[in-house]
Image: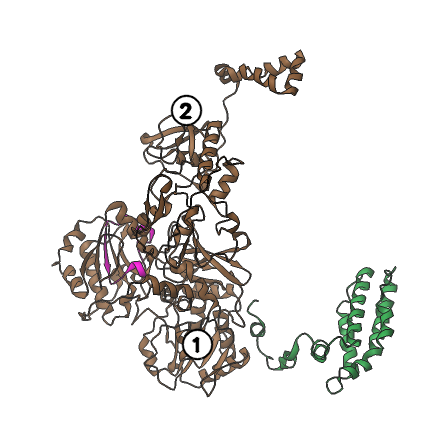
Amino acid sequence: MSFLRALRRVHPLIRANFSNSRVTSRWISSTPDLHNPEAAAAAVPEPEFRPRTPVGGARIEIQNPDDSVEVFVDGYPVKLPKGMTVMQACELAGVDIPRFCYHSRLSIAGNCRMCLVEVEKSPKPVASCAMPVAPGMKIKTDTPIAKKAREGVMEFLLMNHPLDCPICDQGGECDLQDQSMVFGSDRGRFTEMKRSVVDKNLGPLVKTVMTRCIQCTRCVRFASEVAGVQDLGMLGRGSGEEIGTYVEKLMTSELSGNVIDICPVGALTSKPFAFKARNWELKGTESIDVTDAVGSNIRIDSRGPEVMRILPRLNEDINEEWISDKTRFCYDGLKRQRLNDPMIRDHDGKFKPVTWRDALAIVAEVAHGVNPDEIVGIAGQLSDAESMIALKDFLNRMGSNNVMCEGNGLNPQADIRSSFLLNSNIAGLENADLFLIVGSQPRVEAPLVNARIQKTVRATQAKVAYIGPPANFNYDHEHIGTGPQTLLDIAEGRHPFCSAILSAKKPAIIVGAGLFGRKDKDAIVAAVETISKLGGVTRPGWNGLNYLLLNAAQASALDLGLVSSPDVIRSAKFVYLMGADDANLDDLPKDAFVLYQGHHGDRGVYRANVIFPSSAFSEKEGTYENTEGCAQWTIPAVPTVGDSRDDWKIVRALSEVAGVRLPYDSLMAVRARLSRVAPNLLNVDARERSTISEELRPEFKQKLSMAPFGAAVENFYMTDSITRSSKIMAQCSSTLLKK
Amino acid sequence: MASSLRGVARVQPNSKTLEEARSRTFDFFKKACRSLPTVMDIYNLHDVVTVSQLRSSIAAQIRKNINVTNPKVIDMLVFKGIEELTNIVDHAKQRHHVIGQYVLGPEGLDKDLGMQDQGSSHFLKRFYETNYF
């Protein structure tokens, strides 16, 4: 009762009330349960527990009920397996615990102390992110002790954190800013100078303002655990503690941009995005990345007609929450070198802008002036499925079947879907315990597939063997050969690796799409399949024989049957390049007419006679199938540039001018057509497995050439027309690539 | 010339009835028709257009709002018309403004090219105009 007496002393109103005996008695009569817990428990009926919504859709699977424990979060019972943390229990109970250092995809550091909660019978508040649950634990997240603890931690964090939010790029999406508003004190007690830390140079992508760092070490853990590079570390002790590279060194990881997202404060921010925009003035559009075949889920942030930045979106099956640097920073290529008018090459070799009417009429006339079998269509690596089906339909109606997609090589195998897809799925690679990588450098071809392999290797010590040219890996691997000879040795059982593949439970073979360009591709595939049979790579419930594609358009092109051989280009008189910049046109006759339809003035334009400007992936709605066969849609984020049009619309308009009108006028109608050819392309976000067995594949009788495998991607940062015209990507390739 | 129109531009009280608004519209149209010969002179439009074409162009612009029945709105539209007319008569515009707006119309030069697209589909016609349809 002492506090009542104190209250009575301080509060005149209460004192006034207390002077009135009636009020006093009523006031006191309502409180005894506070002082008498047993009586209160008896009086208060058992609280009803409505199911609560877990934080961020967290859910849990209890596999073994004996191993589960029940804990109480603010009185709400939660059942979860042993070994999980107090913070996870709180999340299941729908209580969001503030945190800085904890990140669900990284190891637990427990050094920010922001997640302190009160646990009954524990002498001190505990760091919930690092504390495993114990049976019957009573966790309290909303008590004065927990609140006081958070306030204290905030005060210490802000002791050395500069108050430069108005000039900080993280402002508006800063964890420290948000949490200090909620949990912090309204004034500081420190009058000393704040410490300052020298900024580090981490390369052209990540800007550092190290004074803002709160030493949560998320970036250090990300670099070593996810990116697999030991670049960042913690230096010094106490108040001299800083994040750095120790020696002057750039961060050379293809995933380095993710430290920007992961940093809870403004210490690591995007260098190209610095001072460009505030996050609340941006419009986010949920789209798909097309710079590689992974199909990472991205959010395109735009302001007006300009793409300001690209951020990852969570998709556990594809990119988790990471994206590669190429995906994140290629966006400045979308505003350079763009084609905005239809153009015709004049007699003097210069392009002259014309109207769509004239351009279409000229092309239609030329197309009718050549033999049908001299018409060739090549879809580029960034083409969406809609435009590819339109191109194929158009050429078929013109009487030609010479339609191909660049990168798919000689006589591609499109009949059996499992012969070009990543059959065990990107997420499924985590189950593998042995990898044989054939002619592929996943680190540069598909950084997020590589991140999965790295994750698996780190978690389970899975063995990785690699056949191909010397390459850069960020996990332990065994380089067992450089060419087909090693494949033959394994296939014939002579190689020491055979015993490893035989003893593996879930072996995975990853064949790079760079090999599709080889003349002896079928023989290599046959050798790989022999190994697959020998090692039991394909067994019920596990298909470990994977093909890792290079480009966003490849899988859907094969699904749609754009499968003619590049040889037809030798006799071509009319070439329709639909965004094809990497097609080899050396064999093209000099008098051939080349129509380039694309969004960038890139390699394809040099040989073009007519240019049709089209929209880039950020400006159109398109279907893209990724390397595991998962169809996804891009959503337009910004308007098209100049007089450009969507690819399929151009083909549709040209078909009408040429007198072979295609029967679709809207995107829905094109998709209806798609559903006739490849219905799986309409099952967005679903993976359709091939049901036809490998046994149906025709026999190949081809000789293996002994030439060693080559590298498919020379420069990770510049692989397509968008990235080649990006200034940031050019800076990256000049500073980060080891020459 | 200009001074005679100045008086019109003074803001009048709102029309009380639809009839009054209607008569104001006719007054405006007559005023515009009467100033057309001057307009032809000052913008040197004789070899481009005839008075009757300009008259029908003005009539068409008025008819565009044929469905408006609120006297206040009609007053406002008439006021805007008077403002535009004053600008034209005062030579506050240049020749290409008048030609672009009243001789060619909003479709511009494409109008007479409509013949080329005859027989082509709705899709193709829209395609020539914009990417968004």
| Range of residues picked out in magenta | A422-444
Label 2 marks a residue whose chain is: A
Identify the hue of chain B.
green
Residue under label 2, please give it. Answer: A120
Q: What amino acid does circle 1 point to?
A: Tyr
Residue positioned 39% across, 22% down in the render? A121
Q: How many marks?
A: 2
SS for dot 1? strand
Q: Is residue A298 above or below residue A380?
A: above
Q: Position of residue A407 (x, y in %)?
A: 33, 69
Magenta stretch encompasses residue A431 = yes
Q: Position of residue A11 (x, y in %)?
A: 62, 20
Label 2 Cα neighbours within 10 Å, binned few <14 / some 14-19 / many ≥20:
few
Residue A32's tag is none
Residue toward you, A102 or A18: A18
Q: Are marks 2 and 1 on the same chain?
A: yes
